[in-house]
Image (spheres, rainbow, N blue to C red):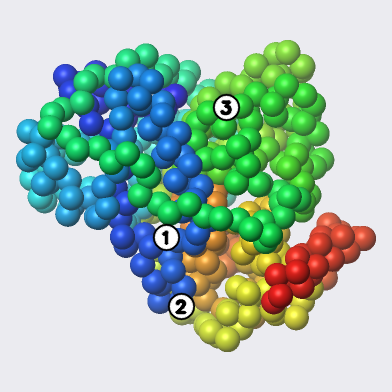
Amino acid sequence: MGDNPALVEACASAGRVLPMYCHDLATDAPTRWGFVRRGAHRRAFLAAALDDLDAQLRARGSRLLQLRGAPAEVLPALARAIGADTVVCEEIAAPEEQDAVAALRAAGLTVRTVWQSSLLDPAALPFAVERLPKVFTDFRRAVEAAGQQPPVPLATPAVLPPLPAPVVLPPHSLFEPLRMGDRALARASFPWWQPAFAGGERAALAHLARYFAGDLAKHYKATRNGLSGVDFSSKFSPWLAQGALSPRVAFAALRCHETEQGASDGSYWLWFELLWRDYFRFLHLQHGRRLYRARGLDDGAPRPLHDQAAFEAWCSGRTGHAFIDAGMRELSATGWLSNRMRQVVASYLIHDLGCDWRAGAAWFEARLIDYDVYSNQGNWLYIAGRGTDPRGGRRFDPDKQASTYDADGAYRARWAEANRRAGA
């Protein structure tokens, strides 16, 4: 709830506010690639976040209403029932979210959208967002040369306006709990089924405090390409992706850490990664739906090839390449994959197996608990060479990557053993 401009605006502009979340059935529909769009790990992590949000709203005199259905199907009827006419929500510059807002407006509701998920304010950039540099390095240098700093995080409202009446609020989440069983390994790099890594703001803030209390941030640049473990990377992304953690709150904690312990290469690299996250957001503001075309931003690119059998082998960790298969098994088992492995397995799908990058992007959407529409689309375009990168795609040699980042074979052995234990 912290640093939530949409919530702050809603509370300031209305005498009564009804916090709500729509479980759009389209989010769990089958994809054209042969699997359900959102897997069980993502659903369970979201359920925990919604439960946490409801608890925090209750502590402030409110509650969370959860409805099942597309916003344009359920919100107009709800608005009529409670005598409301306005929806306040986050501005998301991706096609489906834009279409959802347009449908609400077409249904007669007033919709006020608030941009809030980036670290930097796009209106304060040293260039118009329409002139966003084509290369991330140029973007970063321009931002740093201008001395741009993010806005100070907004405080969480101590008390929310009362709920409208009458409202029937369900007592529990609409999600069925996911039972992890033996397949969820205690050694998972983001064990989201444990309370310390649960979805929601309270776990996020506790993790943020723990991370910056020690020297993990100082060593981030040196450890960030690790493959396994809780502490080799910041692990902020799952909470950032679901909106439970604001990037400005994370940045404020980073600056406090630097004040107390001193700046370092590691702390600078955390800023660097937050800027990458922003860049993909601003890229969406600049290009919109063009980022979702098969050819991406390259009008001259051929239509992607696709081998469905090879794709299915990649998804299930049965390509025959031990390093790739280890990564894909970890992803399926835990909903997590290190940034290094994400790049390597994406490259392998596109450049070695000759498959459509959009299929890989859809699989990541289904599996990753930290799925974020902006970063997922941007990263897959980057690897496929259909984004802004001037080098025309990135191929990672899987053998070289394995020898560099898994020299002792421990990562491959871990997930081969996990696969055997699962009876696969």
**Which residue carries the number 3 mark?**
205
Tell me, yes or no, if residue 324 can be seen here. Answer: no
Q: Is residue 107 left or right of residue 70?
A: left
Q: Residue furthest right?
A: 408
What residue is drawn where x is 67% and y is 67%?
328
Query: Mark 2 Cα within 10 Å, few/some/many (few <14, many 20+)?
Result: few
* Relative to 143, residue 363 above or below: below
Q: Quadrant of residue 384?
A: bottom right
Q: Secondary structure at mark 2?
A: loop
User: Which residue appears at 60% of the width and 37% of the height?
Assistant: 195
Label 1 sits on what residue type?
Leu
Q: On the image, numbered disc 2 is attached to which residue?
A: 34
Could you tell me the amino acid type at mark 3? Leu
Looking at the rendered structure, which numbered label has been put on residue 291?
1
Q: Secondary structure at mark 1?
A: helix
- Residue 40 disc label: none
Q: Quick check: 1 above or below 342? A: above
Q: How far is the residue under mark 3 from the one under mark 1?
A: 33 Å
> Reading the chain from its start, which is encountered first: label 3 or label 1?
3
Q: Would you say the residues marked 1 and 2 are in contact, meaning their CB atoms lie under 8 Å apart?
A: no
Structural distance between the alpha carbons of marks 3 and 2: 37 Å
Up the image or down, 123 lies above or below 380; here it is above
User: Local crowd at mark 1 within 10 Å, few (<14), some, or many (≥20)?
Assistant: many
Viewer-nearest residue: 351 or 409:
409
Res. 339 in view: yes
Position of the C terminus by quadrant: bottom right
Number of the front mark, 3 or 1: 3
Q: Quadrant of the N terminus?
A: top left
In the image, residue 262 lies at what x, y percent?
Answer: 76, 17
